[in-house]
Amino acid sequence: MDESSPDLQSQQDEDLEGSYSKLPAFRRKQATVSSFVFYVLCSLGLLICVEVIIFSRFLLPLAVGNASYSGDRRSNVSDLINLEPEAPFRTSFHFQPPKNWMNDPNGPMYYKGFYHLFYQYNPWGAVWGNLTWGHAVSEDLLHWLDLEPALKGDQWYDVGGVWSGSVTFRLDGTPIILYTGLAEDLEQTQNMAVPDDASDPFLRKWVKSSENPLLRHPDGVYKEDFRDPSTAWQVEDGSWRITIGTQVETDGMALVYKSRDLLHWELEKNVLYTIPGSGMWECLDFYPVAPTGRRGLDTSTRGPSVNHVLKVSSYNDQHDYYAVGSYNEVTQAFTPVNQELGVLYGLQYDYGKFYASKSFYDPVKKRRILWGWSNESDTEAQDIAKGWASLQAIPRTVWLDSELGDNLIQAPIEELKSLRGVKVSKAEVELEAGSILRIEGSYGGQLDIEVTFEYPDVSKVAFKYGRPLDDPFDCSEGGSAQRGVFGPFGLLVMADDALQEQTALFFYISQSKDRQWSTYFCSDQSRLDQLFVGLLCYI
């Protein structure tokens, strides 16, 4: 994670802003042209606007090889070998290595003109195990160069695997890695690695500290429940803090350690936060948020108006939970703004396949970027057959919802806009009841669709159908074929012209007994096939 001291941040921002330049253009795999047929089906008249943006090309997810660095970072990048994904199920925009298993994102940062992403990687197969720190670099968070693994398990304290961790920047601007190592007896240890050559913007080689392990599990903590050190932050007296996830019996908690030199650490008496019975906490993330606006903050930023985010990856249910709250540097206590929600069982980053997330401060665009692992839902046998497993979700920018003050707002990184090509749109189209509208001219391998509906007064709709606004709706398999007063709306993915084969991604709107509106998001794969894509609206 790209972190620096508050005193150096302003100068670093200026220096790094000027160093941002483009890598040579790599060959890009052109999209296979397919006809995407869009349908709008409605049971009463309404006004509709449809905009379809066609992504003009596939992204080549990776280039791999052994480029050397000799002063001009672009001089030898041509030595890298492009890998075009041949498998039809590989992604075009999400980061994934050329092959094999990947899980947690580790230590994302920006350094000397490049974004770096490390990740849990098995170089020997498409199943979990033999974990190393995979490593890739990019100048735009979209096009990536996959490098050799940065860290491998070759010492007694990490021979069982180099597990997750974070990057922290020393006061001189040099990055260090703090990571969890798995010893042969399954003990989890905390360790450090530093760049062998800090002048190399690719940071290809890392050297482990001779003082490793820096930390071993404290008394009362089981040796297998002590992992994933966070990015370090500085407090007012200049000392550093990190938090590490654990559980004591069944109580999940965030331990806090302090250090003067990032090398020698001492356990703080108080924990950052704990919840009885919540189980193991891992991949903790702790960072400040600005009270207003979208600007991100360096992890060591502090002040009376600055709140913090504590994120917990819950091992028990494999979801990422977070809370916004205040941080007391003296007591080390984190207090959520919303006491009822707390950190766990309240707010989630994402309700889909999104876990073990890690954020970092981007000094170039002064934003906080969030990465998260998507393990999809294929079986181990399917992953082995494919030769790869998992991907990283599209990186997103996060900032505080200043209106409510207790939750975050998220949006995909703005760089995605650069991939957009031709736009097809229809504005203010009035549909008669029961009509079907086909959107012509929308061709491409990948599309961004925005549809706006203007519908009649809700009370008139309910009266027309003789149904209450809180009428129950089925969100299970096959539910997309049913009708609510308002819904379903959504996409039919891979639908044929007759709408006999389809995958529905839809939502519906319902009003509760106390007249509060709710939106429910559903999927229906009961008629799955691989043909076309359609847009379906029912009212």
Image (spheres, rainbow, N blue to C red):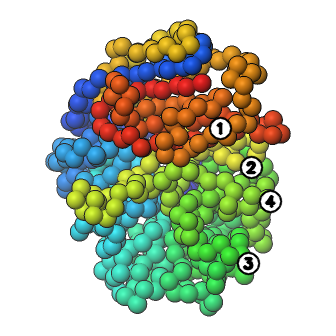
Instruction: Of the two numbered discs 2 and 1 on the same chain, state the one appearing first in sequence.
Output: 2
Label 2: state its secondary structure. loop
The kind of residue tagged 3 is: Asn
Q: Quadrant of residue 22?
A: top left
Q: Position of residue 414 (x, y in %)?
A: 49, 34
Label 2 vs label 1, nearer the camera? 1
Q: CA distance from mark 2 to mark 4?
A: 10 Å
Q: Residue at x 50, y 34 (%)?
A: 481
Q: Amino acid at mark 1?
A: Thr
Of the image marks 2 and 4, the number of the one nearer the N terminus: 4
Q: For mark 4, does the 10 Å Cα neighbourhood hold few (<14), some (14 to 19), or many (20 or more) residues? A: few
Name the residue type under label 4. Answer: Gln
Dot label at residue 519: 1
Question: What residue is shown at x 25% (from left), y 30% (from top)?
Answer: 31
Is residue 194 something that shows in the picture?
A: yes
- Residue corresponding to mark 4: 339
**CB of mark 3 within 8 Å of CB of mark 2?**
no
Say which label, 3 or 2, has the lower sequence index: 3
Foreground disc of the pair 3, 1: 1
Residue 529, picture quadrant: top left
Dot 1 or dot 4: first in sequence order is 4
> Which one is earlier in the sequence, the residue at label 3 or at label 4?
3
Q: Between marks 1 and 4, how big is the CA–CA gap?
A: 25 Å
